Image (cartoon, rainbow, N blue to C red):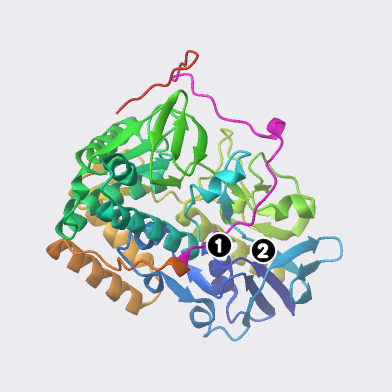
Amino acid sequence: MKHVVVVGGGFTGLNVAKALGNKKGVTVTLIDKNNFHLFQPLLYQVAMAALNAGEIAYPLRMMLSRYRNVSVFKGIVQNVDPETRTVYTDFGELQYDYLVMACGTKHHYFGHNEWEEFAPGLKTIGQAAEIRRRVMEAYENAERTKDAAEKRKLLTFVIVGGGPTGVELAGSIGEMSRYYLSKYYKNIDPKLTRIFIVHAAPRILQTFSPELSSKATRALEKLGVQVWTCSVVNRIDADGVQVGNERIEAGTVLWAAGVRATSIGKTIGFETDKSGRIIIGEDLSVPGYPDVFVGGDQAHFELPDGSIYPGLASVALQEGLAIGNNILLDAQGKQRKPFRYRDKGQMATIGKNAAIAERGNVRLSGIPAWIIWLGVHVYYLSGVKHRIFVLLQWGWSYFTFGHGARIVNKEWRFYSNPPEPAEPAEKIELVSFPECVFTPGEQSKNG
């Protein structure tokens, strides 16, 4: 009987457990710091009060209850000794025959971890609740203040980072301000909200084609979002953001600029890349340790052209199934299969009837892309009940211009990542973009 320990209940870990579920000769222990699986692609909708957390989170034990050989433990993995095949957790030690590492990522503040207090990221339900609290508190405080400068600051939102998360957050704030909140606030005009995306690259949504990136920029502008590209943040504090020599006074700053893998890979002693991802071979195992697999955002799988697979849910899901199948092949004495990713494309939504989708040479925008985005995300939600609730909530919002839970509770205040020492400057490498040319004291603003 082979014992497989899976660390992480995200898309990779969950699909490893499913692939091995009820298979003879294998037992599985899945460990996660939470007792639920979180559908992260819709987490921003929880942050923007469009959905409740319970609609995108599903208990792991319930999802895996039909597999008699799968156990779920809520706990934290502190270290791993690959030589003795031992996993050290906060509830004891576990021996394994195969280990699957799928711990995901956390936000990367490029050596400025003190910025998290002023600019929370979006990776957990706690962070989503904190972002929701800050956004709604900004409108509540703007409603009651009589100071024009303070009101302008409170109605200014800055999102650092122009990837899919940053774009979806900015679009949601713009849509919420213009279509939902304007009906309820009497002393302010939420439509006068200022929203900025500050992005270091020459265009937002770098992984998409320039054509779709431009369409997304125009859709954001229709919602009142100002896109600053080739712009690097120098400082974030309680009163706003410093971008070069320019200052944006803002009541709310959100971080969507970078992620890095959890540090356990370095702790164990595996070879990692600059972002902390564990370097793996074509069968998804760690070189020199064929009994250790890594998948999802924690894995560095290098392609022949030097690129790596992106941190998408579809990649993590397929890697989980491939790892499970390779473990079964091992148990049967058969040769493992190299991992081959089936590209299902990428999508991003900006607001109602506005989205972009790309797969190969097929590029869609507007309502067709938005409908596909809705269908794909509902399909991959866990459980029929969740799919029905989300569809009903979206339908209600679409036809009534109503929005979900706008309740503000200060007890939600929560910072997920404990303070960490700032990384030494020599370890921080920022990507340079030839298209962005700066002169001293100058920043470029496009869009």
Q: Is residue 280 left or right of residue 121?
A: right
Residue 99: image x %, image y %?
71, 65
- Residue 243 vertical position relative to residue 325 in the rendered view, above or below: above
Total marks shown come to 2
Residue 436: image x %, image y %?
44, 20
Q: Nearer the viewer, residue 386 or 376?
A: 386
Q: Residue at x 49, y 51 (%)?
A: 120
Measured in 3D between alpha carbons, the distance from the residue under mark 1 to the one under mark 2, in whole angstroms, is 9 Å
Q: Nearer the viewer, residue 109 or 342?
A: 109
Q: Is residue 108 visible?
A: no
Q: Which residue is mark 2?
A: 100
Q: Quadrant of the C terminus?
A: top left
Q: Amino acid at mark 1?
A: Thr
Q: Quadrant of residue 13?
A: bottom right
Q: Quadrant of residue 2?
A: bottom right
Residue 155 colored in magenta in the image:
no
Q: Is residue 169 left or right of residue 423?
A: left
Residue extent of the magenta highlight = 412-436
Q: Nearer the viewer, residue 402 or 145?
A: 145
Residue placed farthest to the front in the image? 146
Secondary structure beneath dot 1 equals helix
